[in-house]
Amino acid sequence: SICSLSEPTDGRPLVTSISDFVVDFPRERPSNTWFAPFLSFEVVLLLLFLDLLPFNEIRDLFVRVIGHIANLCKEALFSPAVETTAVMLIFLAWVLRMDNPIYLLSFATFKAPDSWKVSQAEFVEMMRRQGCFTEDSINFMKRLLERSGTGQSTAWPPGIVQCLQDGKETDRSMDASRKEAETVIFDIVENALRKADVKPEEIDVLVINCSLFSPTPSLCAMVISKFGLRGDVLSFNLSGMGCGASLISVGLAKGLLQCRSFGGKALVVSTEVVTPNLYYGNERGFLMTNTLFRCGGAAIVLSNKWGDGRRAWYKLLRTVRVQSTTEEAYNCIYETEDGEGQKGVRLSKEIVKVAGKCMEKNMAMLGPYVLPLSEQFKVVVSLIARFFTKTL
């Protein structure tokens, strides 16, 4: 028997000897695989009869168990070749982990229905039917339209296009604005998920940017409710960040994915809602937005799981963000009211200058990552020559 028990006067069994309680193992063991099951058995017995043993017996048993474990650690579990391979695989896994790539699984853009599309002549007629623009303002927008590079089939929301029909007025209500947002966002999200072969419940991060339309509930809540995303999805609704919000959203999604221990998937949506943002005044700085902006949207699915690399379209290598902190940069695109109290977005004449400086800084930061050393050397020489030319 493993242990010998005696019956005390109170009827409670008592262990008489720890030497009887524990299996006595031989000093020489052919292998660790022979020893491990009996060591586990010894620990199990210790736990079962812990309350029955005297303190000195428990101490001696612990000493024996620790001694067996120490002897086990001294012996090689695997051959040197296997251990070397294991170390190399662990190192390779660490290197791959440090890379933490971001893959683009799909990309979808909004294809407007034919009922939304208007020609340049129809656009001018729409502006005329608003009944608030002077002839000078209409001619100004017409000249801008001819120079803007827009085609003869650009998309406007149905709430505004319906004014081309006799007897109907422009609808700029919240319901019409939501309808435009739902039509655009639902279409591109559905197409992006389908192309990526990703189910909505697999999305871990959701980022939507829309500068001028920020309703309550948010656009993120609208997508979560429509497609049934998980309750613990990380959702972010960005507004007021202008044309650069698309790249900002990608950078945000990248950072959130790389913070996850086991990877994940992100859905990034970028759009602008035109319905509530048509300017009804006659100041030229505000009229430019009526001419340049149209309906549209794009959605992408990102992943940082290694298994998705084989089916990814692209791999994100680098994101760079530059901001200008000058006063003229802050005021170059400004949402406010004009002199008559009409709300709109004013574009300053300094916008081209500000954008050029920001692009120059952006390229200076991005250049070292994409240019070969020979080209970087030429840039350094050019900068030095420019510096000395200015000082002379």
Image (cartoon, rainbow, N blue to C red):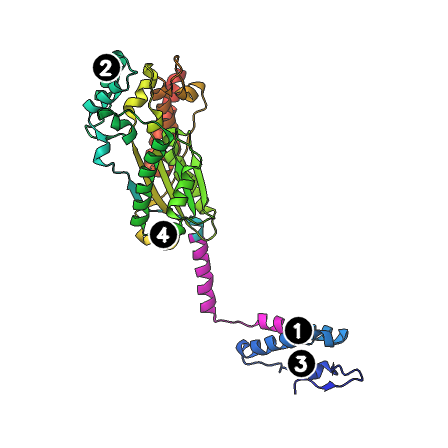
Residue 97 on the magenta segment: no
**Sequence-first tag of 1 and 2:** 1
Quarter of the image with the C terminus is top left
Per the model, the C-alpha gap separating discs 4 and 2 is: 49 Å
Per the model, the C-alpha gap separating discs 3 and 4 is: 56 Å
Per the model, the C-alpha gap separating discs 1 and 2 is: 92 Å
Q: Can residue 149 be seen in this view?
A: no
Residue 81 on the magenta segment: yes
Q: Can residue 87 be seen in this view?
A: yes
Give the labeled residue for mark 3: 22
**Sequence-first tag of 1 and 4:** 1
Part of the protein shown in magenta: 67-96
- Between circles 1 and 4, the one closer to the viewer is 4
Per the model, the C-alpha gap separating discs 1 and 3 is: 12 Å
Give the labeled residue for mark 2: 139
Q: Residue at x 34, y 51 (%)?
A: 198
Q: Which amino acid does label 1 sit on?
A: Leu
**Sequence-first tag of 4 and 2:** 2
Specify the quadrant of the image occupied by residue 244. Answer: top left
